[in-house]
Image (cartoon, rainbow, N blue to C red):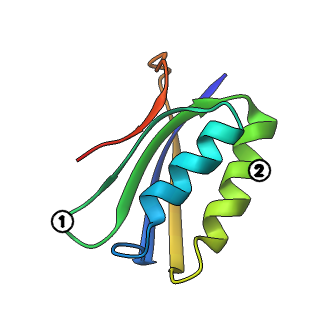
């Protein structure tokens, strides 16, 4: 199991990016949360198996239809043993 802290930059708020992220995480059985940041980026903390996280990262680089991802910053962090993936407000 791996934990990633991810910051997604670009046009990622107001385009259903958090819901898109939640749907992907659910389908890949990943746990954690996603939230909007005050600077217009999106923060994701997510845990799961390495192969599933690679698929997740590939999909968020694309984003939903109206999103424009310009940069993704990803760092590995300590496991927190989340029990589900949710949108944080």
Say which residue appears at 69% left-offset and 61% top-offset: 59
The residue nearer to you, when weighing 88 against 71, is 88
Marker disc for residue 61: none
Say which residue appears at 64% left-offset and 49% top-offset: 24
- Residue 40 x %, y %: 28, 73
Q: Which residue is mark 2?
A: 55
Whole-Å distance between the Cαs marked 1 and 2?
A: 27 Å
- Residue 88 x %, y %: 29, 43
Within 10 Å of disc 1 (Cα), the crowding (few <14, some 14-19, many 20+) is few
- Say which quadrant the N terminus sits in: top right
Q: Which label's residue is closer to the chain start, 1 or 2?
A: 1
Which residue is situated farthest in the left direction here?
Answer: 38
Q: Which residue is mark 1?
A: 38
- Residue 49 x %, y %: 73, 28
Position of residue 67 relative to residue 46, above or below, is: below
Say which residue appears at 61% left-offset and 42% top-offset: 25
How many numbered dots are placed on residues in this image?
2
Horizontal side of residue 58 vs 46, given as left or right: right
Within 10 Å of disc 2 (Cα), the crowding (few <14, some 14-19, many 20+) is few
SS under mark 2: helix
The residue nearer to you, when weighing 86 against 77, is 86
- Residue 9 x %, y %: 42, 73
Dots 1 and 2: beta carbons under 8 Å?
no
The residue nearer to you, when weighing 25 against 4, is 25
SS under mark 1: loop
Q: Quadrant of residue 65?
A: bottom right
Say which residue appears at 50% left-offset and 20% top-offset: 79
The residue nearer to you, when weighing 54 against 24, is 24
Which residue is situated farthest in the right direction here?
Answer: 51
Horizontal side of residue 56 vs 17, given as left or right: right
């Amino acid at each position: 199991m791996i934990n990633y802290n991810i910051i997604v930059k670009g046009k990622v708020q107001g385009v259903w990016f958090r819901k898109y992220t939640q749907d992907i995480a659910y389908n890949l059985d990943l746990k954690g949360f996603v939230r909007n940041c005050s600077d217009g980026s999106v923060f994701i903390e997510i845990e799961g198996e390495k192969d599933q996280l690679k698929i997740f990262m590939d999909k968020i680089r694309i984003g939903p239809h109206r999103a424009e991802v310009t940069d993704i910053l990803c760092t590995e962090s300590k496991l927190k043993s989340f029990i589900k993936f949710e949108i944080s407000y």
